[in-house]
Image (cartoon, rainbow, N blue to C red):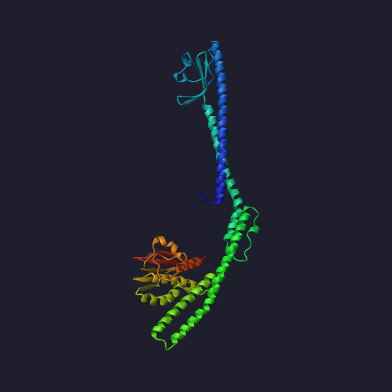
Amino acid sequence: MEFKQSLSRRIVIAFVLMTALVGGTFAVGIVETVHQVEERLISSELGGDLGRLLKMESMDDWRHRPEPGQLFYFTGGREDFALPADLKDLSPGFHEVFRNEVSYHGFMELVDGRRYVLLQDQSGFEEREQLLFAVVLVGFLISLALSGVLGWLLARKVIEPVVRLSRQVRHPDQLLDEAPQLARDYAGDEVGQLAESFDTTLGLLRRALMRERLFTSDVSHELRTPLMVLASSCELLLDSPSLDERGKKQVRRIANASEEMRGLVQTFLQLARARQDEGGAPRATLREVADDLVEQWRPIIEAKGLSFEYRPQEAGEQLYNAPLLRSVMGNLLRNAWHYTDQGGINLSLLPQGFRVDDSGVGIPAAEREAMFQPFVRGGSARGEGLGLGLSLVQRICESQGWSVELSDAEPRGCRFQVGLHERP
């Protein structure tokens, strides 16, 4: 399983875990070593004290008592020296004995079938042991804190070239043809190899973008001449007295299609231009673009037997890229007209955007995200469309920092809402 953490955080976590493992092992080793050594020393001390007492017994000198804090018992002892029942089953050697919530270190020796037990209060030993544990624990926690700080400082130093490379790659200037090579700013280590890989990939991307821009620009430029011929020919045919009304109707359809294609050519040219060249694009308010499109689409929509409601009251006065805004709104109106057979279409202008509602076939929730991909058509697709209209809408919105959302309309159909946010 891959950890979804930043590289610097991974380095810090690795430092802390390594310190916890090494420091924890070292701390446990210290505590266990001290415990074993102290146990051996106490065992040796108690064994020596017990031997001294046994020598006293052999001389029948029981006026001498054990050391303060010690208790002495033996088999057959009288009064305070009588062997308690809880000590009769001890095996020879060192023991830890708990009596009345008090802990003792004990040593038992078997001589001529008689048991001799010497107990010593280990309260002082426990206090020293607790102090040792506290010192080791505090040292362990301090080492963890220091490892975290050291890991953070080293992480910043280690990943600084990676962060700098990431910023350089994300910079928009890297898509320019004259962008400098990244690898020359780094050493020949792993980061330098990564920079070389980015140089190669960015070079391929620049060439692909250049081919796309040249293709779009060339095609759009070459289409202008035949479109102008179509437009002028339609004007001449409409002025001809020999053309009947039916013929004029068809010529108007050709003229409308030519005008629509001219708008698409202008849109493609706008998308092909670099961002800094967009200042020369015509600007218009949302209301101006919408009024023009409503005049164009109302007869077409109503000719299909649909109602068309236009609500421009809330439109703001912000200026936008007119060809691109016209293309977005026009494609959404065309999409609504194409997929609506009964009911109507509503166009509502908002303070920072607009909304297109239709009563058409609708789009299932599972298909909505894919509808904005190129060459994707819904399950209710009809006609000879290529599925590029919504894809073009998405591309234009992304290029301008706008947003487009697809949801259900009431009681049926689709709702497309476009937010015309100001691009930073």
Residue 404 placement (x, y as % from top left)? 45, 65
Q: Quadrant of residue 46?
A: top right
Depicted 123 relative to depicted 182: above or below? above
Front-lying residue, 110 or 127: 110
Residue 299 placement (x, y as % from top left)? 38, 77
Front-lying residue, 63 or 405: 405
Residue 306 placement (x, y as % from top left)? 35, 73
Depicted 348 relative to depicted 67: above or below? below
Front-lying residue, 173 or 254: 254
Front-lying residue, 61 or 203: 203
The residue sitting at the top extreme is: 60
Q: How many numbered marks does the figure carry?
A: 0
**Residue 91 appears anywhere in the view:** yes
Q: Quadrant of residue 361?
A: bottom left
Residue at left offset 61%, top offset 50% = 158
**Residue 274 appears anywhere in the view:** no
The residue sitting at the front extreme is: 384
Residue at left offset 45%, top offset 77% = 257
Residue 312 placement (x, y as % from top left)? 40, 72
Residue 173 is left or right of residue 418, and the answer is: right
